[in-house]
Image (spheres, helix red, strand yellow):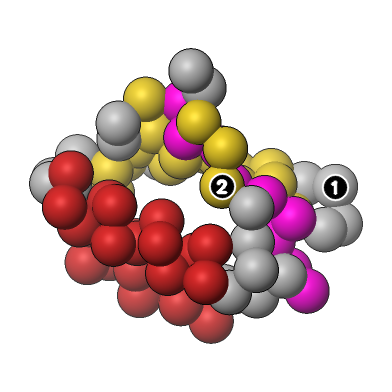
């Protein structure tokens, strides 16, 4: 699982934040995200410098784009 900084993660993610590419996002831990893509692929990320506020804002943005976000709980 790649480890990345929050700002780098957001730069990579921004062009792909669309229901056309991402089927859903699964939050397994406070800093582990799994993206499920519409082509059947998936990619997991560990963000090593993300605050809960940053993550909450990012997940809200993802949801606002029509992409479901699920929690492991």
- The prevailing secondary structure element of the residues shown in magenta is strand
Residue visible at 39% across and 33% down? 32
Q: Is residue 65 shown to the viewer in this render?
A: yes
Q: Position of residue 24 (x, y in %)?
A: 67, 50
Q: Nearer the viewer, mark 1 or mark 2?
A: 2
Q: Nearer the viewer, residue 5 or 24?
A: 24
**Is residue 27 covered in magenta?**
yes
Residue visible at 65% across and 68% down? 66
Q: Is residue 37 above or below residue 52?
A: below
Q: Which residues are magenta?
A: 20-28
Q: Is residue 5 shown to the viewer in this render?
A: no
Secondary structure, mark 2, is strand
Q: Earlier in the sequence, mark 1 or mark 2?
A: 1
Q: Position of residue 12 (x, y in %)?
A: 43, 70
Q: Are marks 1 and 2 in contact (CB under 8 Å)?
A: no
Q: Nearer the viewer, residue 20 or 68?
A: 68
Label 2, on which residue? Answer: 69
Q: Quick check: 64 left or right of 54?
A: right
Secondary structure, mark 1, is loop
**Is residue 14 covered in magenta?**
no
Dot 1: few (<14), some (14–19), or many (≥20) neighbours within 10 Å?
Answer: few
Label 1, on which residue? Answer: 40
């Amino acid at each position: 699982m790649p480890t990345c900084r929050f700002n780098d993660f957001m730069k990579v993610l921004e062009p792909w934040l669309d229901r056309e590419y991402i089927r859903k996002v699964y939050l397994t831990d406070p800093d582990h995200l799994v993206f499920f893509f519409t082509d059947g692929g998936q990619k997991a990320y560990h963000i090593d410098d993300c605050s809960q506020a940053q993550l909450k804002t990012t997940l809200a943005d993802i949801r606002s784009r029509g992409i479901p976000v699920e929690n492991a709980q």
